[in-house]
Image (cartoon, rainbow, N blue to C red):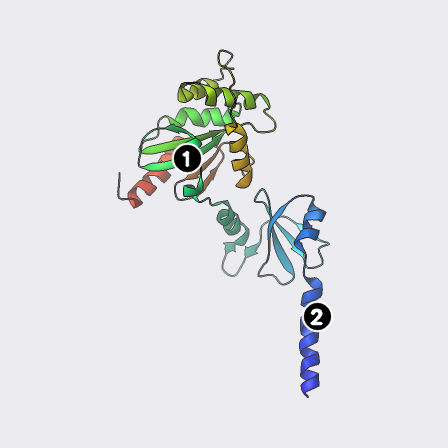
Amino acid sequence: MKKLFVLLVCIAIMPVAALAIDKSEVQKKLGMPVKSIAPTPVHGIHEIVTQDNKVLYMDDSGRYLFAGKLLDMEKRVDLTQLRMDEISTIDFSALPLKDAIVMGNGVVKLAVFSDPDCPYCRKLHKELKDLKNVQIYYYVFNLPMHPKAYEKSKKILCSKDRIASLDKAMAGDELADLTVCETDLVDKYKELASKYGITGTPHMVLENGSPVKGYLPAAELQKKIDELAKKKGKK
């Protein structure tokens, strides 16, 4: 009886060991770094979080990969969205605020990752000027499709008046009157964006770590700021 029990335990364990997927093997198949692999509530399906914070799913064999929404129909919950919100949250205190371009002096802090040649970044920049009770920390860098924005970002960071130069760039000025200095801040900003899986601009991070991906009208952004200010007991 004892031998039978041991045999049954071994049989129960064997499929699990055989079906486990290896992180290094997954990275080879995907051709990109993987942050984490974790089981999902669905038997035999694993969650894959890539370096740029995308959520994918893979079966135990490692043969089948798919992207999409994983929904809990009993609880009516979008498990994929919950996970994406979780991994997109940033510890605001870990951001290098001293290296940023600072605008405003409100009680609520807001980080903005922006590209000077990004149309929606320019649209957002105009509206950020109208926000109240917020201090904005700007990180300017170029997306791969805007190579000229790399030099513009350097010029902004090298100028005596960074905010004025940022305003000019966001208004479409090519900054021909400004010069480039020796600074590694743009590269640091790009590394920072990559670290947090930020692949598009504008990308904002509220003081509580919540991300705001893409353009958001000032009125809606102000509501979020007011909510945070209220929680801090300051209006």
Q: In what element is the residue under mark 1?
A: helix
Query: Residue 14, which numbered label?
Result: 2
Question: Which residue is the site of mark 1?
Answer: 97
Q: Please provide percent x and percent y for residue 198.
A: 54, 38
**Closer to the N terminus: mark 2 or mark 1?**
2
- Quarter where residue 45 is shown: bottom right
Q: Residue furthest left?
A: 234
Rendering quarter of residue 190: top right
* Front: mark 2 or 1: 1
Pick the residue in front: 32 or 159.
159
Q: What crowding class fits label 1: few (fewer than 14 Cα within 10 Å), some (14-19), or many (20 or more)?
A: some
Question: Residue 135's quadrant in the figure?
Answer: top left
Q: Is residue 217 visible?
A: no
Q: Which one is in front, 202 or 185?
A: 185
Residue in view at x 44 percent, y 42 percent: 94
- Please tell me whether residue 115 is drawn above or below residue 225 in the rendered image: above
Which quadrant is home to the N terminus?
A: bottom right
Q: Residue shown at 71%/80% (left/top)?
A: 7
From this viewpoint, is residue 192 visible? yes
Query: Vertical placement of 88 versus 146: above or below?
Result: below
The disc labelled 1 sits on which kind of residue?
Leu
| Residue 180 horizontal side relative to residue 102, left or right | right
Q: Is residue 164 left or right of residue 172?
A: left
